[in-house]
Image (spheres, rainbow, N blue to C red):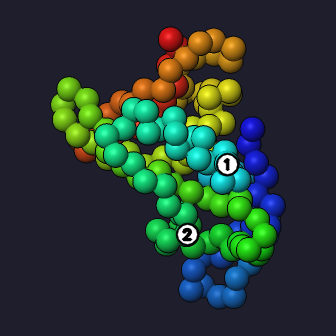
Amino acid sequence: MKTYPTGVRQNFNVQGAGPPNWGPVANENWRMFAPLADAQSGLGMIEGITDEVVMVDAKVLGGMYAQFDYMNPLTSDIRARVAIGTAMDPQGQMAIMEYPSDIFDRDKTPMPFIDTYTAGQAHVLKVRRITTDLGELYWAAA
């Protein structure tokens, strides 16, 4: 289930373009966030089809993830986390970067235009190449 990122705020100003403009995390960014238990469940799903993968707090990656501020870092385990790894297909190895929380959520609710199963249908997690060296994970009908 998508988790509202309680205890997290988003800066809607471009970094370095004035003082922060804090507000609630935009709905389209909710898929990045989950409690640790849900993220670990999503990571377990990802581990099943990748060669190697690690999960990191997205904040360490900087860039777009620097816009999020965890207001209660010691009492809340809701975070944006990214699974970074590699997977293979007949063309060779490819990089994978996914939100474990999103994979976890999409196991029950397919994402239109990405996942190829319908709610309630048996499905499996797969990988497909989207560029010469980058892949994405998707849920496909079994």
In this picture, is 113 found above or below 18? above
Give the CA separation, mark 1 to mark 2. 18 Å
Q: Amino acid at mark 2?
A: Lys
Count the labels in the image.
2
Foreground residue among 130 and 86? 86
- Mark 1 lies on a secondary structure that is helix
Identify the residue position indicated by label 1 in the image. Answer: 37
Residue 51 placement: quadrant: top left
Q: Amino acid at mark 1?
A: Ala
Q: Position of residue 141 (x, y in %)?
A: 52, 14
Residue 8 placement: quadrant: bottom right
Mark number displayed over residue 59? 2
Q: Position of residue 7 (x, y in %)?
A: 80, 67
Residue 134 visible within the image:
no
| Left-right relation of 19 to 135 | right
Q: In the orientation shown, which residue stands out farthest toward the left?
A: 91
Residue plotted at (52% across, 39% down): 44
The mark closer to the camera, 1 or 2, is 1
